[in-house]
Every structure is written in structure tokens, then in C-alpha cells.
Image: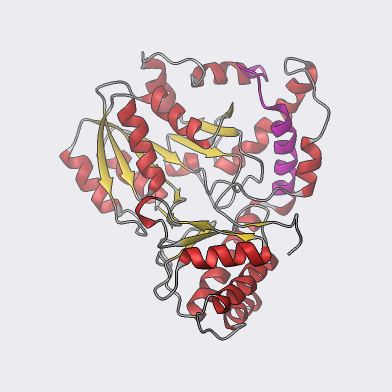
Amino acid sequence: MLPDQQLLRIPGPSPIPPSVQRAMGKPMIGHRGQETKELLQRIKPKLKPIFGTQQDVLIITGSGTAGLETAVVNTVKPGDEVLVIVTGSFGDRFAKICTEYQIKTHRLDIKWGKSVSPGSVEAYLKEHPSIKAVFSTYCETSTGVMNPIEELATVVHNHSDALFIVDGVSCIGGVETKMDEWGIDILVTGSQKALMLPAGLTFVSASNRAWKVMDANERPRFYLDLKKYQDNLVNDATPFTPALSLLFGLEQVLKLLEEEGLEQVYTRHQLMKNMTRAAFRAHDIPLLTSDDSASSTITAIKPADFQAEDLRSMIKKEFGLEVAGGQQHMKGEIFRIGHMGYCSPADVLQIIGIIEIGLQKIGKAIDLGKGTRAAQELYIG
């Protein structure tokens, strides 16, 4: 491989389009000046369709985890009861944030690689009528599972008065999302995944129901106080210094998504998922998730007869291709491929071809090209 060539195909950060990189290189401007005000005016309306909402999408300088913490501190207070649906490492993170803030946290733990059943959430809510909020991941980054968010929102609202709060960090911008129609009360995402930017921005939108709860919540908060962001965004400003270079890049990202069309963006991600899964199935290499639960932005593979880390090391050394390993108890047991954002079917074919060589080199007997052909045939249709 070339010394400075890197093929980054992990579940975030994801590659950045060249036009976005160029946009981020613009000269700095005053963050309280007219130019920044006009930049935010242009960005505001274009974020709403990605969230599927008529509400403002608030922009906070911070990582996706900052967005998760923001969702917690604005909606619940010490002693409140919440339910956290844990389908992997980032559901677990939601639970840890709640516990750290002295919230009475109920966990609904689901086997990693499985999505949550709406019926199990319904049963839990009936047993615990005091729950104030239900937290869930949309795409669980650590396993490549997509939870049935629309159905979960219906269950939460039909069987409780709880807010439904969703971590969409590893999929918003790559999958269909209808925050208002589905009944999501707070939706969070980050910049470094399907939105094709470096890490450093988190985005939060809240329903009218959520705003009523937040307005009545007396818990102290400062930097992560959503009311400050809402009040400032009305005037096309931010309460604290924004990451201006990322906002330059964000404007270009939104232009790219608009030009492609969101429906085509979602179709492209679905196609890449299907191509990736078809390739591994062609080699009889087990996938961690079922088709029904599989994410459009991440595929997790759980090999039975070779070491995931051996393959990861081989393809990184030989080709500069970086895929992710497992987290927590799945470390060393799975590897994960990110196919999100600035990624196309052509990239998937490259990934599969490289992985086939890697499998041969670590000693797994395969028919070279069999997985690539399966992906090609699926693409052709």
C-alpha cells in the first residue's frame, strides 16, 4: 500500500467528501458577526428534513456523547425513574449517564445482536408506571442493530406518559427518520458518521411535549442547557462559541444531501448493506444480526472459524483498510464495517475484494471473488 493511503471503513468517524474538506478550510470569521448569522440562517431549515421534524435542530459543539448527556440533564432529575433499552455498548452508555446523574435507572437488557421487541417494552412500562422517560438507540453502533423506533414510540406513548428519547448518532442522515410522525420526543445525532464531518458537533431536536417537561425541570445545567440554544437559534446565534469550520463543512454536507435527494441517500445505504451482507453469506461467514434487525450503516460479522483480529490486522497492514473490532465482551469476537455517509457501492466492492484476499492470507479457504460476485449480482439486480 502507499504510505499515506488509508481506507477508513469503521462505524465513525467516516470519510469526508473533498468538497466538505475544502469548505472547512475557509478563513475564519467572527462568530458573533453577520456572516455567522447568515450561515446559521442557511443551515437551520436544511437540517429539519434529515430529522423529519418541523422543530428546530439545535447545534451544540461537542461529541455525540455530549448530545446524549444533554438529553438526560434537560429532561429528568435525581430520583426520577427512567427505562433504558440496552442493545449494546451505547445503550449501556445511556444507562451510565442516567446513573451518574442519580436517576433511578431501569435497564431492559437485550442480547447483543438482537433488536428490542416492542412487546417487551410494553410489558415493562405496565409494570413500572412511574417511568418518566424511555431511552433507546436507533442504530446500536456496537452491534449493527437497528431498533424498531417507530413501533417503540407508539408503545411508549400508548402505555405511559414518558418521553421517548433516541440516540440516532450512527444512522441519522443515512436512514429514513420521521421524528414528528413517529412521536420521538428528543432525537440526537453527531457529525462524524452519516453526516460526513469530523467529530465535534452534536445535534438535538425536541418535541413540544419535551419542551414542556424541560421547562418544568429545575435541575441546574449550563453549557448543555437546551433552552439557551433554542433562545439563541431564534436569533440565528449560538449561546457559546461555535465550531465554525465544522459549520462551514456542515453547509456543504447539507448541499450534497439535498442534491442527491434524501430518498436516494437512504436507498444507497440500504443497497450497501445488502451488498455487504450478500458477500459474507456467499462465503458462509456468520453475520451478527438478522436481516430484519440489520443496520443500513454498519454491518457486524461474527466469524466462526477464524480470528476477527487476525483479519483486521492483515487488511490494515496490506491495504490500509481499517474496519472496527468488537466492544466490551465482544472484543475479539466480531468485526464491524461502516458503510455510511461518503461511501458508495463502488467502495463496498473494494472492501469485499480486499477482505477476500485477507481471508486467504490468514488461512481461511475461500473461493476468491465469490463474495464480490454476490455483491455485484445484487447491485445489478
| Residue 246 on image: x %, y % | 69, 33
Viewer-proximal residue among 103 and 184: 103
Q: Residue at x 16, y 40 (%)?
A: 127
Residue reaching furthest to the right: 27
Specify whether residue 378 is in view.
Answer: no
| Residue 113 on image: x %, y % | 37, 59
Specify whether residue 227 is in view.
Answer: yes
Give the answer, above or below, for where 206 lies relative to 154: above
Please state, as top left, top right, bottom left or bottom right, where the N terminus lies in the image.
bottom right
* Residue 234, image quadrant: top right
* Residue 214, image quadrant: top left
Q: Residue at x 63, y 71 (%)?
A: 354
On whether residue 33 falls in the magenta region, the answer is no
Q: Residue at x 39, y 53 (%)?
A: 148
Viewer-proximal residue among 62 and 185: 62
| Residue 248 on image: x %, y % | 75, 33
* Residue 345, image quadrant: bottom right
Q: How is the image coloured?
A: secondary structure
| Residue 104 on image: x %, y % | 24, 29
Q: In screen coordinates, is 244 left or right of 367?
A: right
Q: Residue at x 66, y 67 (%)?
A: 318
Q: Which residues are magenta?
A: 234-258
Viewer-proximal residue among 103 and 368: 368
Viewer-proximal residue among 281 and 159: 281
Give the answer, above or below, for where 38 lies relative to 275: above
Prevailing SS of the magenta stretch: helix
Please state, as top left, top right, bottom left or bottom right, where the C terminus lies in the image.
bottom right
Give the answer, above or below, for where 212 lies relative to 335: above
Count of numbered marks: 0
Residue reaching furthest to the bottom: 367
On whether residue 236 falls in the magenta region, the answer is yes
Give the answer, above or below, for where 360 lies relative to 155: below
